[in-house]
Amino acid sequence: MVRDNPPRTPADEPGGPPAELDDFDGRMLELEPDEESPFLRGQKRVPVRRGPLPRKAAHRLKYALLALLVVGVLAAIAGFTYRYGAHSWRFRLDSSDQVEIAGLEHVTRVQVMEVLGADIGRNVFFIPLAERKRQLEEIPWVESAAVMRLLPNRLKVQVRERTPVAFVQIGSRIALIDRSGVVMDLPAGSAKQYSFPVIVGTGDQEPLSTRAARMKIYDTLIRELDSEGARYSQDISEVDLADPEDVKITVANAGSEVLVHLGSGHFLERYKVFVANVQDWRQKYQQLESVDLRYDQQVVLNPDSAARAAPAAAPPQPAPTEPAPKSATPKPPPRPKRSR
């Protein structure tokens, strides 16, 4: 019986590789996949379709379009609101009853409506509030004014009036004046009574700046005279501010009036010298018309009457003088009541 010989392998050949390597190669061949694994990255690049703009630019464009849309909607709403507010009858000021005015005492409603009368029948949104405020403040008694819209169809005017501090004589006219130098006419038909000195020495054509500077001197004078509680300002009937370096006051004393020169300062100190010695001076001289207290070492009595009595061709006679007495705290004389 003939035995078939098995096929020879490389391991059986003389000098061939060992049998273990042959088995290892067989196992390696069996591990090779027959088809491509789904978990391996493809060797071929797949083309990606891209838009005409980069992604970041596309997002920016989208936000810009959205913002533009919002702005357009808001503009449309604003335009509709403007047209409605400008043309609707609901916002029309139909009569003076729709104007509320507060703060009036000396200013009349008629004076205010002379300024606002042109706005009757006008839309409240088209009334120039700043211009009306300026016109109201041109009324002498008005110190400040505020004009406000009260929707839908009303106006409110708040007036702050000036506070007078003295009478002022301008020519032959007597008026009131405030601390800023603004002159106000006496209110017609007012029941309020004022008790102020009369300021003289100011002209009708005098600018407001000059009057304001003089009123600062007046305010200092009154404040000093009343600083210690004696209320000496109530003794004064007239204040002459024509010369800022020589403030002159007219004082009612013992049934007559005396003109007192106080200079440009130390008003209280000098006036106390006058009050402390006026009775002695009246006893020494038959008639006391004026006293000059501007000098530290002496007091000049009746300087104005001595100058008036001197002949025109002769030099004026010197007025009697006395050494300056020490100031004291006298008992204030009775104060006359002044009113206009």
Image (cartoon, rainbow, N blue to C red):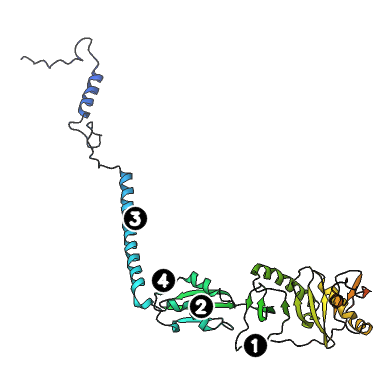
Mark linked to residue 157: 2
Q: Which residue is at a point 51% across and 80% down the rendered structure image?
A: 112
Name above or below for residue 50 compared with residue 165: above
Residue for badge 3: 67
Labels 3 and 2: the sequence-earlier one = 3
Spatial separation of the CA atoms under disc 2 and disc 4: 16 Å
> What percent of the width, then of the height, locates residue 279?
90, 84
Tell me if label 2 and label 4 are in contact, CB under 8 Å. no
Spatial separation of the CA atoms under disc 1 and disc 3: 65 Å
Q: Is residue 302 left or right of residue 202?
A: right
Tell me if label 3 and label 2 are in contact, CB under 8 Å. no
Mark 4 element type: helix
Q: Which amino acid does label 2 sit on?
A: Val
Name above or below for residue 168 compared with residue 25: below
Q: Which residue is at a point 34% across and 73% down the rendered structure image?
A: 87
Residue for badge 1: 192
Q: Which residue is at a point 6% across and 14% down the rendered structure image?
A: 2
Labels 2 and 1: the sequence-earlier one = 2
Q: Residue furthest left?
A: 1
> What percent of the width, then of the height, locates residue 13?
19, 11
Q: Which of marks 3 and 4 is in front?
A: 4
> What percent of the width, then of the height, locates residue 175?
65, 80
Tell me if label 4 and label 1 are in contact, CB under 8 Å. no
Tell me if label 1 and label 3 are in contact, CB under 8 Å. no
Q: What residue type is labelled 3?
A: Ala
Q: How crowded is mark 2: few (under 14 residues within 10 Å), some or many (20 or more)?
A: many
Residue for badge 4: 126
Mark 2 element type: strand
Labels 4 and 1: the sequence-earlier one = 4
Q: Which amino acid does label 1 sit on?
A: Lys
* Of residues 102 and 269, the one drawn nearer to the viewer in this rendering: 269
